[in-house]
Each structure stands twice: as C-alpha cells, then as structure tokens.
Image (tube, coloured by chain):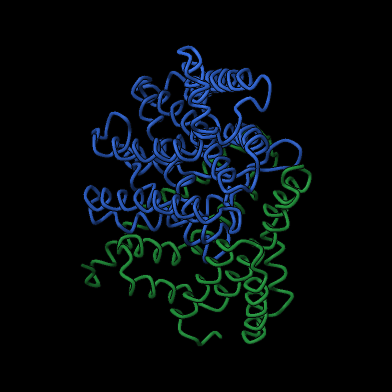
Chain colours: A blue, B green
C-alpha cells in the first residue's frame, strides 16, 4: 500500500502532510508523557522488529504468500501512540533507505498506515475487547481490528489517489477494497496468532496494554478520533457519501431546487449514472454484511485458537 | 558525490521532487532539465548503471500496475504517461540520494533542523538494529526449517507466528539491555 511519488498531487500532499504531522506530533507528545524512559529504546527495537517481521512470508494458496503489516498488532502490544511513532519511523526509513513509498506521499502513507492502521485499529480492538472478556476475547478483537484497519486504510488510500486525479474512484475503490478485504483476513489471522504466541510466552509483556489493564485516556480518544474523522471526511466522503443526494431531495421537496440551480450552477450534474443510489446502497449493505461475516469468522477463530481450558 | 555534505544534497533532492510533483507536465523544460541533472549526477557519483536500473525496475511494479490500469481507462489515457514520468523521476532522485548518503548523515541533518528528538532517536535505533533483527529472523527461520520435516499448512502459520512472536519478545528483551547500556554510558 506504499504510495510512490507522482501519484499524489500538490494539494493532496500538503493536506495529508499537515494532517499526518499533527497526528505524529500528538502521538510523540503522548508517548513522552506516558512512556517511562526505560521504554524509549523499545520503540526503536519495535520498529526494527516489525520491519524484520514483515520479511517473514506466510504461504497462501497457489504459491503466493502474504506478510504481516502489523500496525494494529504493535498498537495492541505497545499502545496506540507508541504504535503511531513506530510505524511512522518505519515508513520514513523505508522511504529514504529502501525507496519504498514516495517522499511527497509520505504524509499520505503515514496517515493510512501509521494513524489509521494503529489508532483506528486500536479503537476497534478496545471496543471489541471490552465486550468480549478474557484471552479469547482479546484474540478475537485483534483479528477483527486488524481486518477493519486494513480495509479502512485501503479505502483512504483509494480516496487520496482519486483526489489527486490519478485513478478514478469507480476503479480505485472496488479494486482496493476487495483486494484488501482478502489481505485483511490474512492480516487478522497473523496478528491474532502472533499476539497469542507473545501472550503465552510472556504474558507480563502485554499486561499493560490489554483493554482491561490500561486506563482509558480521554484525550487520546478525542485526538485520534478527530484526526481520523477529519481524514475520512476529506479523502473519502466527497466520493462515497450520499449526503448531496439527500440534500437535493430535500431541496426538491421544498420546491427551491431550480432556484438554487439557477443561481449556483452545479459543478457536475448529479445524475451521471442511472442507479447510483442503488450502487451506494448496495455498497453500504455489502460493507455491513462483510463486517458481520468477518466478525463471525473472528469469533470462530478465537474459539479455535484459545481452547476453553486456557481461560483463566 | 559521496563526499558532498548531506544538507545541500537533501535540499536539492527535495526541490527536484517537489517541483516534479507540483508542476504540470506542460513545463517540459523542468522535466528535461531535472532528468539531465539526475543523469549527470549519476555519472559523477559513479554508481553502476545496471545497479540503478535494477533498483528502478524492482521498485516500480506498483507504478506499472497503476499505469496499466490507467492506460485502459477511457478517462485516464492522457494521464498514464504523466504519472509514469513523474514517479519515475522522483524514484530516480531518491535512489541517487540514498545510495550516496549514509543514513547517519541524514539523521544528523534532521537533528540540526531540530526535528523531534524522540522520533530521531527511534529512527537511529531502528536503523542500528534493523539488520541485527533481520539476521535473527533468518536464523530462527532456518532453525525452524531444519526441525520440521512435514510442512502441514495448518501448522505452518502457527509456527511462523510463533517465530514472529518470539522475535518480538527477543526485541523487547534486547531493548531492556540497551537501555541499561545507555544509562551506564550516561544517557540523559
């Protein structure tokens, strides 16, 4: 998902850069405030770990293989702010050292892979983990969270590419989403397996970041929530949202649609494709059903991976 | 080229990349000048031509993919060449800079520009231990391969995940040792 240079135009680069800079600055401040100094080297080592872990190939059917991306996993192991710093570090080093991902696309890449993948993934993990208790609940939560974060990051990436005028939304959105819905299943499974391995070997390492062990921080929730909402509002909503349609229908109802039309010529007629409302509705339905199916899979996975005997 | 100080090199690279991304393709002069300068730099830096070409080709499957998608789109037909030229030029720039500048010098520039200290420390540590942990992964994988004869797919994922989990545990234990070593040498 590393966007190279030339795929992101000037305005998108600036906007993503600003949002990511704010996000990373916020994460750094949080880390400095809450992380004890003895854990500072752990950030660098975690970054090196994640980089090395990405080289381990997991065989998939047909000779292909996938690897861990790991933002959500690191967020579950170290906490969301530390994960944002860790993944940002990896992205910067990959950009300069291995030319993976562009310099001007750094902001977009950091937003998608560091902020969305870690902070949004962690939010889902917390939410599900609070609802499902115990180790089995945590394993389920991290699998589901990793899937959600992967798909959400892919949607944001598609939005940024469309906004830059590189790929039309009608191509980018279905391609990115379907591919990453499949990749996300692998990602969720690997994340859950690794989490389980760490927690069975050194349960003390992750005791501080489990949904019950770590105190809720309101500032963190509000900060990342605002950032992610802003990002999605800028990158995705203009292409995927049905609000203008709703507004149009209201205008129609009250009978002033042709007046506004006359005063403000619409930038694009909103009836380009017949049945667009159906398409939007169908996409939303597919998304909801997909989420439910994957959540069911995650529940099954948790049940399969953590036998009842192990429950405390 | 290798001995030039890092700051002007990075500055020039940033200017070239920003200009290439922002300027519309109509400005032929900019793109031709940039390309000529880059080729000249490559000559001066004595990087082997084949090596640079290999890096460019290895890194561009994503670029090629999107270019191909665009080439078959009715709307994107004018677009694909632009994207290919722009990302090719930027990639070329970064390949040149990163192969003539040690990473420690890039970090020094960032530090002198007053970048966030925590981020730079993390980057330095990551760069230092990147190859150590990569070697460790390789060793663990080889040990695993030497001990498992049947590669049942169902169990292979579990084993690989255990390797990754073990790697995390080793990394965090190493981090503790490093912290002690850093304190012993008067860090902070």
Position above or below: B74 against B62? above
Rendered image quadrant of residue A218: top left
Q: Is residue A23 visible?
A: yes
The spot of residue B66 in percent (x, y) is 70, 49
Q: Quadrant of the C terminus of chain A?
A: top left
Residue located 62% across and 84% down the image: B45
The spot of residue A31 in percent (x, y) is 28, 50
Foreground pick, B71 / B163:
B71
Foreground pick, B159 / A112:
A112
The spot of residue B145 in percent (x, y) is 64, 49
Q: Taking A263 as reference, is A126 left or right?
A: left
Q: Name the outermost residue toward the top.
A: A253
Rendered image quadrant of residue A224: top left
Tally of numbered tags: 0
Foreground pick, A145 / B25:
B25
Residue located 30% across and 69% down the image: B114
Residue located 37% across and 61% down the image: B122
Position above or below: B21 against B13? above
The spot of residue A32 in percent (x, y) is 24, 53
Position above or below: A40 against A164? below
Q: Is residue A72 visible?
A: no
Q: Name the outermost residue toward the right.
A: B72
Foreground pick, A269 / A239:
A269
């Amino acid at each position: 998902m590393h966007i190279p240079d030339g795929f992101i135009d000037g305005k998108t680069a600036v906007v993503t850069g600003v949002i990511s800079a704010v996000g990373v600055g916020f994460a750094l401040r949080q880390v400095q405030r809450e992380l004890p100094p003895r854990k500072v080297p752990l950030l660098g080592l975690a970054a090196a770990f994640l980089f090395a872990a990405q080289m381990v190939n997991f065989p998939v059917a047909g000779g292909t293989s996938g690897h861990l991306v790991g933002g959500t996993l690191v967020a579950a192991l170290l906490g969301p702010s530390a994960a944002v710093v860790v993944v940002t570090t990896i992205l910067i080093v990959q950009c300069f050292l291995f030319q993976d991902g562009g310099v001007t696309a750094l902001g977009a890449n950091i937003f998608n892979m560091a902020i969305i993948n870690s902070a949004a993934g962690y939010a889902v993990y917390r939410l599900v983990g609070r609802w499902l208790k115990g180790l089995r609940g945590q394993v389920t939560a991290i699998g589901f969270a990793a899937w959600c974060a992967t798909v959400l990051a892919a949607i944001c990436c598609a939005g940024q590419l469309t906004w830059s005028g590189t790929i039309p939304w009608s191509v980018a959105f279905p391609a990115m989403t379907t591919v990453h819905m499949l990749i996300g299943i692998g990602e969720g499974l690997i994340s859950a397996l690794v989490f389980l391995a760490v927690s069975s070997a050194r349960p003390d390492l992750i005791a501080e970041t489990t949904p019950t062990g770590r105190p809720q921080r309101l500032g963190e929730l509000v900060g990342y929530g605002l950032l992610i909402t802003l990002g999605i509002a800028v990158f995705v909503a203009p292409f995927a949202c049905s609000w203008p349609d709703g507004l149009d229908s209201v205008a129609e109802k009250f009978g002033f649609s042709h007046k506004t039309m006359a005063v403000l010529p619409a930038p694009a007629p909103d009836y380009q494709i017949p049945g667009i409302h159906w398409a939007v509705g169908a996409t939303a339905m597919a998304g909801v059903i997909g989420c439910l199916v994957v959540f069911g899979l995650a529940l099954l996975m948790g049940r399969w991976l953590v036998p009842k005997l192990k429950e405390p | 080229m290798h001995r030039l100080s890092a700051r002007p090199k990075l500055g020039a690279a940033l200017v070239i990349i920003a200009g290439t991304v922002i300027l519309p393709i109509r400005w032929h002069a900019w793109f031709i000048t940039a390309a000529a300068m880059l080729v000249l730099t490559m000559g001066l830096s004595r990087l082997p031509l084949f090596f640079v070409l290999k890096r460019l080709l290895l890194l561009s499957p994503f670029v090629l993919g999107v270019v191909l998608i665009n080439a078959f789109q009715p709307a994107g037909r004018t677009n694909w060449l632009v994207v290919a030229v722009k990302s090719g030029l930027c990639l070329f720039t970064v390949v040149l800079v990163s192969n003539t500048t040690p990473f420690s010098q890039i970090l020094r520039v960032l530090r002198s520009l007053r970048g966030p200290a925590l981020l730079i420390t993390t980057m330095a540590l990551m760069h230092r231990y990147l190859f150590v942990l990569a070697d460790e992964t390789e060793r663990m994988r080889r040990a695993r391969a030497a001990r498992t004869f049947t590669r049942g797919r169902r169990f292979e994922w579990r084993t690989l995940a255990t390797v990754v989990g073990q790697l995390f545990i080793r990394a965090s234990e190493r981090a503790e040792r490093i912290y002690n070593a850093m304190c012993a040498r008067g860090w902070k």
